[in-house]
Amino acid sequence: MAEVAPDFFWEEAADGNRNLRHGTPDRNNQEVYDGTTGTMTCYMPEQGTNYKKAICYLNGFTGTAAFDFPMPFTVAPLVTGVSAGVTVTMNALLVTAATATTGWVTMEGW
């Protein structure tokens, strides 16, 4: 779902409803992976039953890392951004980079 405004975001409630919140989303489930060089930082801000979104940022990353989605996709997600060395399933993102890679990988679907 698109960002509403810089200080507002949608939050999925336990009952499946969405609530508009003010502030910043909880980033506690952000995961950082060290490569041979650089890092891969991943986060899954949307984990609903009807919409899911995961984002990863590669910062000069070389090596191999896997991000297991906290909430797996029901079907293979649409992947945009860095594509070389990127494999995405319904359960995880796997990155294998032989050269330093910088950029975003975004996965969206349900």
Image: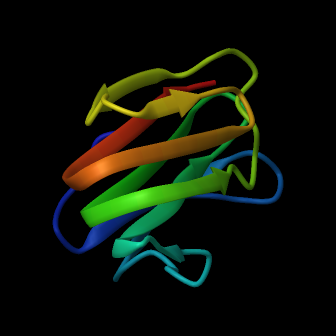
Q: Image quadrant of residue 65?
A: bottom right
Q: Is residue 48 above or below residue 10?
A: above
- Label tally: 0
Q: Does residue 25 appear left or right of residue 44 in this picture?
A: left
Q: Residue at x 34, y 83 (%)?
A: 23
Q: Nearer the viewer, residue 22 or 46?
A: 46
Task: Pick the residue in front: 13 or 89.
Answer: 89
Extreme-top residue of the structure: 75
Q: x and y percent of residue 13 in the render?
A: 71, 59
Above or below: residue 52 compared with residue 60: above
Q: Is residue 85 left or right of residue 58?
A: right
Residue 20 seen by the camera: no
Towards the viewer: 7 or 91: 91
Residue at (62, 53) in percent of width and height: 66
Which residue is located at x 69 percent, y 15 percent? 75
Residue 21, image x, y percentages: 43, 70
Task: State the quadrant of the N terminus.
Answer: top left
Q: Which coloring applies here?
A: rainbow
User: Outermost residue toward the right?
Assistant: 15
Residue pictured at 44% horizontal, 33% vertical: 86
**Residue 84 found in image quarter:** top left
Percent coordinates x, y for residue 39 in the rendering: 37, 73
User: Which quadrant of the figure has residue 89?
Assistant: top right
Q: Is 13 on the left-hand or right-hand side of 8?
A: right
Question: Which corner quadrant holds the C terminus?
Answer: top right
> Which percent across, then down, holds residue 106?
37, 39
Q: Does residue 79 appear to the left or right of 44 in the view shown? A: left
Residue 35 visible, this angle: yes
